[in-house]
Amino acid sequence: MTRPLAIAAALAAVSCKPSPKSPLEVVPLSGADIYSMRCSVCHQQDGGGIPGNCPPFQNSPRLAGQPSELIHLVLQGRRGEVVRNGETYNGIMPAWRDELSDDQIAAVLNYILETWQPGAARVSTAEVSAARAATENAPLLPQDG
Amino acid sequence: MIPRRPAAILLAVTLFSLPAAEARPWLGKELLPAREAPPIELQDQNGAPFQLSSLRGKAVLVAFGFTCCPNICPVMLSELAAARRALPPEQRALVDVVFISVDERDTAESLKQYLPLFDNSFTGLTGPREAIASVVKSYGGYFRKDERGSHAIDHSTDVYLIDPAGKLRAVFQRSQLGETAALAADIARVLEKP
């Protein structure tokens, strides 16, 4: 094979390879990484949320509540109005069960708790796995969750 | 060095006078040559007839989805809202996001309730299934009912940027939409240089 042909063949072989998987699938990302990639567009990097749309993590009664509720929220999402500290928010929390693994959900929740609710109990992967199994047929984006 | 100083000054002036946007690569895939955006004639969330040509003079981002989508569409619309918010007010007023529902269960009313969850300015469109299918196809997109038998709809997630002259200028993949500053810069570029 002549050199140009060999180069062309090599390039063709490279370009025909399947595209790599999402970084979320192949690289073990930290909770902070996942937060930046998946959460910060609404919750903001500083956790301050969006007025009228997404409540802040600072002084959040939900973060101070049961970890099981947080896991359920991340798995199933939520839609509709919520009132926090006298302010009304109306938005959508996406359901992440098909996008994030149990390890990743635990990691990102622990990052959020460590950052904005330091005294709270941490979330384990086993807890997320159990919640995932228990909610397999539960509706996504509930309005009351 | 002295004789070179005027040349050096000229070079510096030239470099600094170039628009920053020209030196920066596009986030999305730039479409060259820019071509007329395929027409869109559907019904908006207020039940009024909508024509894409009515948005001439604005930058328009076109996305496909459905209001019951549990994950992809809310994230995509949140990212588009974030990019719009990142623009200065005078440019933000010249940006429209057009969300076309590919779900026959969606109505003008459901779109009217859904879109303010992201941004009050967003336009939602629906219409006869054949008309929607025609628009989606004209943009190179697709949609089909989820084969798993759920109520979900499998659909393309590319977002299209149309400039104020009605030309299709760039396509963004879903994975790029989270790059808020770069997406806002691409929008600003077509506003500044139609």
Image (spheres, rainbow, N blue to C red):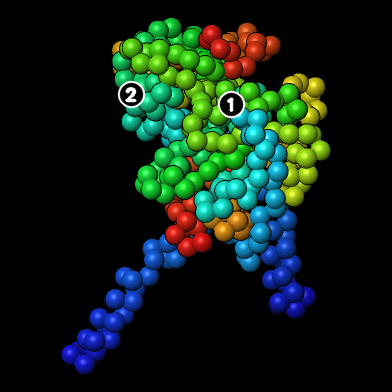
Q: Residue furthest left?
A: B2
The circle drawn on residue B112 is: 1
SS at circle 1: helix
Question: Where residue A101 sits: x, y (%)?
Answer: 58, 25
Question: Where residue B187 sits: x, y (%)?
Answer: 49, 52
Q: Chain of mark 2?
A: A
- Residue B45 visible to the viewer: yes
Q: Residue furthest bottom?
A: B3
Quadrant position of residue A5: bottom right
Question: Where residue B8 sits: x, y (%)?
Answer: 26, 82
Question: Type of residue at label 2?
Answer: Thr
A60 or B13: nearer the viewer: B13
The residue identified by callout 2 is: A115
Quadrant position of residue B1: bottom left
- Residue B181 visible to the viewer: no
- Judge left or right: residue A85 versus residue A32: left
Seen at 61% across and 44% down, the residue is B62
A116 or B98: nearer the viewer: B98
Question: Type of residue at label 1?
Answer: Lys
- At label 2, counting other C-alpha atoms closer than 10 Å, the crowd grade (few under 14, some 14-19, many 20 or more) is some
Q: How many marks?
A: 2
Seen at 67% across and 38% down, the residue is B49
Note whether A8 is above or below B2 in the view shown. above
The circle drawn on residue A122 is: none
Question: Where residue B153 sits: x, y (%)?
Answer: 73, 29
Q: Residue furthest front?
A: B48
